[in-house]
Amino acid sequence: MCGIVGYIGKRDAYPIVLNGLKRLEYRGYDSAGIALYDGEDLKVCKTKGKVADLQAKMEKDFSITGNIGIGHTRWATHGVPNDVNSHPHYSNNCNLVIIHNGIIENYDSLKQELTKRGYTFKSDTDTEVLVNLIEDVQKQENVKLGKAVQIALNQTIGAYAIAVFDKNKPDEIIVARLGSPLAIGVGEDEFFIASDASPFLEFTKNAIYLEDGEMAIVRTHKEIKVRKIFDDSLVDPYVQELQMNLEEIEKGGYEHFMLKEIYEQPQAIKDTFRGRMLPDQGIIKMAGIDEHMNKFLSAKRIIIVACGTSWHAGLVAEYVIEELARIPVEVEYASEFRYRNPIIDKDDILIAISQSGETADTMAAIKLAKESGAFVFGVCNVVGSSISREAHAGAYTHAGPEIGVASTKAFTTQITVLTLMALQMAKKKGAISRSKFHEYLVELESIPNKVKKALESNDLIEQIAHVYKDAKNCLYLGRGFNFPVALEGALKLKEISYIHAEGYPAAEMKHGPIALIDEQMPVVVIATRKGHYEKVVSNIQEIKSREGKIIGIVTEGDKDVRALADHVIEVPDTLECLTPLLTTIPLQLLSYHIAIALDRNVDQPRNLAKSVTVE
């Protein structure tokens, strides 16, 4: 999410920072900016749009001299994409500038306190709050920049990678990280700062990767000083020689963006939780739903509209909301909903789900619902997108940019947001006990680590993929909460391997699909111990008696399915309504490895687009 670049040394900083930002464009962004210091003036130029737009503006209106510079590409999390919300941000006295990746969860309370002390804010960002907090610490504590940054970060809650510059201390840049990556390139009397090594790879192969909870003072003509943010202990920095090429760095060492994004899901789910779920306090905080809770609790029904993978997330949400909150839910393809003259009431709530927030059919469904007086709630990944603006309220998934066309982390983070919403509604409605609510929060908190555990089956899944890569058809079966996961697994295989696949409720197999099963038909069956397990085992026995090839997705320690299936992939145990967050992982990996075995372009499959903005 976002990109950071910085330079301090003897060269002109501008071309290094600018080209570094271009190297980080693959990460996805909505705006960009650069700050330069030429020994006298601290200049900031920023704009909504692409790095090319920034370059044109910078070279037309600004002096581009200076040996110190920092730059940023922003993916909006607080405040819509515009020039003002773009980074870098000045402090009130204009001595400090900051660039920041991540989310400061307690920015609102910090902002209120700073406002009482006379600070003013031009943007809607959490980052401007942080730079003014650092300025305030400098004044109150009378300390140098490095110490001020450290004290300020000890007052924040959240995730960050930051670079801070003070024009009164022009020989240093302070950097720090917690939850967001940050690398320092080490040259001859010069240093480079970046989210990954791609911006400085042509200048140096030597890099220091800061660990979580570390900060560094990067000075010209001096060694880098690294210390722990929270206990102030010094750290001996490890300088490693980079072996990766540019393309490998952009993909984080993964072969494809899709695989990278599959492996990003533990962190993406954590980012979705961040600032919203507090298990120790037994609370969920979601402003978008909390401010309109009466509408949700009094709603006659909830209508969910979406397309593709987002539609499958909506189906999971239907099961979860009805199970926990006991509110009727209907899930519709947005493309069908808008054309079938639906009955929409002012007491209905419409939830629109879209990764990009630009899906044309979903936008049209929103407008139709609003014309009928329904309340519209958007679930999107892209801040400031059309759907987020058109909806009355909403929640962002905070999954970060998803480059691969086949959606992976957007799906699991959509389910995460919708599950948090269901729990909050259930609690406020009194449909769930306090102890059960707390049980769900504790279990949700464990999901990122359980997703990591599920990812450990990657090598096994790759072997299974080679067995079935030449299949012409494939059937996916699931029941209850995992029926939508079966649909999603089939879609993933179709999208990137071009193999025909269908998802079905396991109980419906006998009403048609069973006629297709023979020794040539792989059947993927989701059979976790939670949710009609015995009935699914009976379905598996029916498949086996017809010589179908069975790939079972099972709970750790399962014996019954293992005795029947040709292949078994285990996932950790969890509460029934949370199983989709785990069972979808092996299906993503299976589709990926089959596509790779067939030499498909997994990041850009034929005929597909990341954001469908036409009807």
Image (spheres, grey):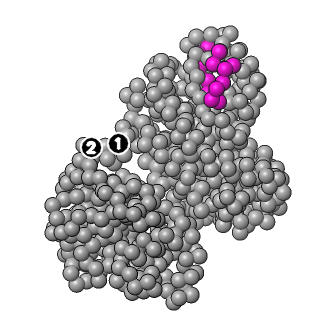
Q: Residue 222: x percent and y percent?
A: 21, 68
Task: Name the one closer to the observer, 107 or 556.
Answer: 556
Q: Residue 300: x percent and y percent?
A: 83, 56
Residue matched to label 1: 253
Residue matched to label 2: 244
Q: Secondary structure at mark 2?
A: loop
Quarter assignment of residue 598: top left
Is residue 360 something that shows in the picture? no
Q: Is residue 220 left or right of residue 382?
A: left
Q: Residue 577: x percent and y percent?
A: 71, 42
Q: Secondary structure at mark 1?
A: loop
Residues in magenta?
A: 548-564
The residue shown at (68%, 30%) is 528
Instruction: Give the amino acid type for the residue marked by disc 2 in the picture.
Output: Met
The residue shown at (36%, 57%) is 210
The residue shown at (67%, 46%) is 443
Q: Is residue 310 left or right of residue 429?
A: left
Instruction: Give the amino acid type for the residue marked by disc 1 in the picture.
Output: Gly
Task: Examine the structure image and report whether residue 556 is included in the region drawn in magenta.
Answer: yes
